[in-house]
Image (spheres, grey):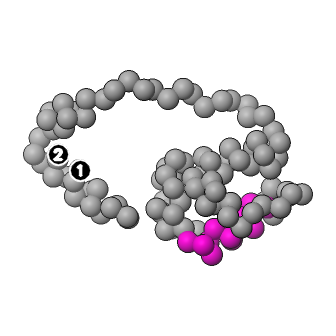
Amino acid sequence: MLGLAEGSLDLRRPLNELGLDSLMAVELRNQLKVDLQLGVPLTATLVFDHPTVEAIADFLVRDALALTPALEPAATDTTPVDAIGHIEQLSDDEVDRLFAARLREPGA
């Protein structure tokens, strides 16, 4: 739907950042309802209320399907990262390459 390479979808990245528009959001909602054979309606604002694949899946499992997830998500590591120290260890070429890649990302 979004023209992404297989396996390249970040489950925590908002779908609208990947180009999902309101028409695609409605199509996704409709397809989920059909594929999951849901007996309950899904709101037209499903993708906007739950903007990531992870959030949609969590909503579907817990609310629409009333299931208990098999595995709870792992605790988020809250250890501070020394980003400046990491960047200072990169060569100028590595910094240039990373910066150029970031500029090519949609919505950057």
Q: Secondary structure at mark 1?
A: helix
Point out the image quarter for the N terminus. bottom right
Point out the image quarter for the C terminus. bottom left
The answer to whether residue 11 is visible is yes
Question: What is the x, y in percent for residue 25?
Answer: 63, 68
Quadrant assignment, res 46: bottom right
Distance of label 1 from label 2 (alpha carbons): 6 Å
Residue depicted at 63% across the width and 60% down the height? 47
Residue 100: in magenta span: no
Q: Mark 2: few, some, or many residues within 10 Å (few <14, many ≥20)?
A: few
Q: Give the residue number, with chain letter if any, for mark 1.
A: 98
Left or right, residue 2 beside residue 38: left
Please report the bounds of the magenta region as a residue range: 21-33
- Contact between marks 1 and 2 (CB within 8 A): the answer is yes
Residue 22: in magenta span: yes
Q: Secondary structure at mark 2?
A: helix
Q: Mark 1: few, some, or many residues within 10 Å (few <14, many ≥20)?
A: few
Question: What is the x, y in percent for residue 16?
Answer: 51, 63
